[in-house]
Image: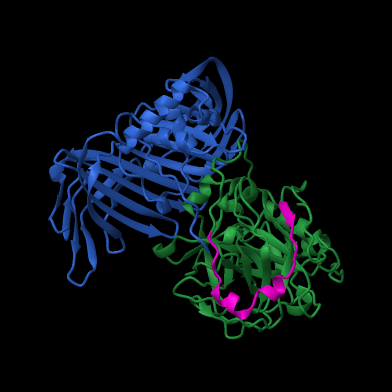
Amino acid sequence: MGVLACALTAAAAAVAPLSAIAAPPHAHGSVSSPIGPAASGTFSTAVDPGDATAFWTPARLRNARALTVTPTSASGGAPLATPDTAAPGGAAPLDPAGPTASSAFDPVADPEAPGNRIGGAIFVVLAGGEGVARCSGTSVSAANRSLVITAGHCVYDGGSHGHWLAGKWVFIPGYRNGERPYGVFPAKWLGTTRPWRQEGSENGDVGAAVVGRNERGELLADAVGAAGIAWGLPPQQSFDVHGYPVAPPYNGSSQRLCAATPYLGHDFGSFLWTGPLNLAVECPVTGGASGGGWLINGDTINSVTDYGYGEAGSTDYGAYFGGAVRDLYKQAAKVK
Amino acid sequence: MRAPRPKVSWLAAVAPLAAALILAAPATAQPPPRALSFSLLNSDGYQVTVTGFGPTVALAVHRPKRPVATMYLVHGRVTKSSIQGSFPGLGRVDVHFKPGGRKGKHPRCESVIRGLHGTFKGKIHFRGENDYTTVDAHRAKGKVVDYGLLRHCSGGISSHGRKSTNALIKAILGLGGPKAKTTRVLAEWKQPLGGVFFEATQVGRDHTQFVAVEQHTFGRLAVLHVAHAHGSAKRLASDPALSFASVTPPAPFSGSADLRHDPDGSKRWSGTLTATFPGAPDVPLTGPDFKTILARSWGPVPTVPAPLPKRLLGEVPRQLLLPSL
């Protein structure tokens, strides 16, 4: 608790004033050149929001399947490696509220409740006619009031030969069974960490999106609030895992939650990938829950759902939030 | 949530498989990775091999010519000429590489592979669980291998190497070789932070090969146990309908295990089967939580055990195996 308090204090000094207003989305029909790579070690691309909002009808939303990707570079890692040494840091939440406790991946009683509506479903059109897919994400506090944190593979399919998943990418907070209670927020910028972008390292599978205004002209954080974010903390946390699983036995109709599930340890494979060792918790997630926020203290994101082992169990694996995530956050927070 | 990306499997005692995995890997735009490795032969007969690659420092313990090994893995610091890794509760490696002269050549890739031999100097301390082996040393002979160049062997830079690679892969896959009836028993128990895998493969009436892998993580330490054995065909018995199988592998295994298909469709994997690894005696390989497969096929005879389940082992430390080629 003391560490977290310290982290949030440090963050308060580092983050720009919350009253800053982001610029409106890019003009319809234009696509900007990629922004990255940035000096901070993250990678990003600009996205044309286009007609994403109109495209996502309730029928399309219900039909979107779980996003599955495979990093397209051979592994091997960089020849040099250094431990993650990120000092504790982060940003305070805009709309703190704790979820009610549950012992399984149960539906939340009300996706529009303050602690839940910061979570939402992500929908994206895959390139090459591969259909539509979905992930989960969280509205996170940032100066632009428009930041979504999700899994890296929900914005970029990983590795040095990967591609940005920028097709009509939208975030729908508080989503429930085709309903869009706070509207649709189309991405105008996507970014991910260096380990995920360059190597497809599962330890760096974290992504970010800066979204435009919804149909009502609202910024994301103004519409639903935003979770805080913390990095550099000890892994021994208790997490509220949110997500919108769509693969069986779930159907993606509503947000689900594993409440207060404790850190178990690190996945074996994590020892062979670049980046800080990832985190394991007990939560029976399936496809579609990718990118769902792992909140500590009910209001501060400290990991996201990245992968699991299918039928083999109920363990959810997420990236440790260290220096790479800090860099990604700081870059995303600057996007107007 | 998604499944992790496809993983390549490894088997410490089977260098040809590792070679094929390395050579078959697609080239990337990444800079050539580098593996640093050294070995020490202890007076108690254990050989300790330390390898550094990328973020990983691995310390493997085995007895020469015995197909059983334990590997400890941590995230450490590996540079072009140094390895630093702390193995919680077991020891520490902090060494720098001093080139010692000759450059090695890979027999199949001629001059394409660059291995620089020399000496690692610094601190090498390891004490195995229950003191099954102890190492305290300040120097060890080893090498630095630029394994990224190895990939070019399969890319046509060296026609000699390419031919050799193709032959190697064909041999491993059994292509062009004899065909036989193969019966396999697989049992796997996936746990949150590891798992156990066992496979028995009976090849015709000739022989049966056995593989067991146990892996787990404990805090910032990961441990991998691997055992491999060959026995007669009689060591795997099964009925024609594949409703039953029984295995009795030789050392380092002990005991036996039965796989039974019950009338209700359920399967039971039970028995006394265990494997003994360095530092981990009598690890159980049966139980109600194992998922099993019993299958029979007719086809090429594999020259090495089938790839281990990708979701169990995680990414293969291909680089870790290179020094053993």
State which chain is coloured green: A
Front one among A175 and B69: A175
A198 relative position to A316: left or right: right
Q: Residue furthest bottom?
A: A109
Q: Is residue B280 visible?
A: yes
Q: B189 or A136, which lies in front?
A: A136
The front one of B45 and A278 is: A278
Query: Where does residue B137 sit, x and y in percent of width and height?
Result: 49, 27
Quadrant position of the C terminus of chain B in the picture: top left
Q: Is residue A60 magenta?
A: yes
- What residue is at 50 percent from the left and 29 percent from the top? B37
Left/right of residue B122 with respect to residue B190 in the rendered view: right
> Is A256 a magenta residue?
no
| Stretch of the chain drawn in magenta | A43-68
Q: Residue at x 51, y 46 (%)?
A: B88
Q: Residue at x 40, y 30 (%)?
A: B166
Q: What colour-coding does the image apply?
A: by chain
Q: Is residue A6 visible from the viewing direction of this image?
A: no
Number of numbered callouts drawn:
0
Residue A218's x, y, as percent?
80, 77
Q: Position of residue A54 (x, y in %)?
A: 70, 75
Q: Is residue B106 above or below residue A26?
A: above
Query: In the picture provided, is A218 more to the left or to the right than A315?
Result: right
Left or right of residue A180, residue B36 in this image: left
Q: Colour of chain B?
A: blue
Residue B267 percent coordinates (x, y): 23, 65
